[in-house]
Image: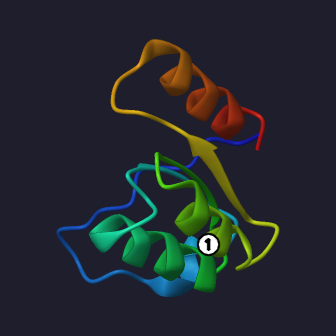
Amino acid sequence: MPVSSPINFSKPIDYASLKDRNVLLTGGASGFGKAFVRMFAEHGANVVFGDVQDQAAKELEALGKSVVSCRQKGSAKADTTLVSSSFIAM
């Protein structure tokens, strides 16, 4: 899989450039994280996110096949490894 450059948030986002990008977020089931998951997915990015809120995470997964959630409780090593592994598998 080719590696793409990071998204530069200091400039306005070129939403077309998000298509097929891989995005990893933590705390993606509520607040700003939820808004970012939706925004990235709506513009064609593949999103993996971790959160402890299982029900909210499942609702976001319904956005499409490009959104994957993993149960993550803070910085617990096993949970962080699962989220990272899911991202790498994209």
Tell me residue 39's x, y (percent).
48, 81
Tell me residue 21's x, y (percent).
62, 61
Say which residue label 1 marks: 60
Picture quadrant of residue 57: bottom right
Whether residue 82 is situated above or below residue 72 in the rendered picture: above
Quadrant location of the N terminus in the rendered image: top right
Q: Can you see residue 9?
A: yes
The residue shown at (74%, 76%) is 62
Marker count (numbered): 1
The residue shown at (76%, 44%) is 90
- Check the image and tell me how it is coloured: rainbow
Left of 58 or right of it: where is 56? left
* Residue, far left: 10
* Residue, far top: 77
The residue shown at (64%, 74%) is 59
Q: Can you see residue 43?
A: no
Tell me residue 26's x, y (percent).
40, 47
Left of 16 or right of it: where is 89? right
The residue shown at (48%, 55%) is 53
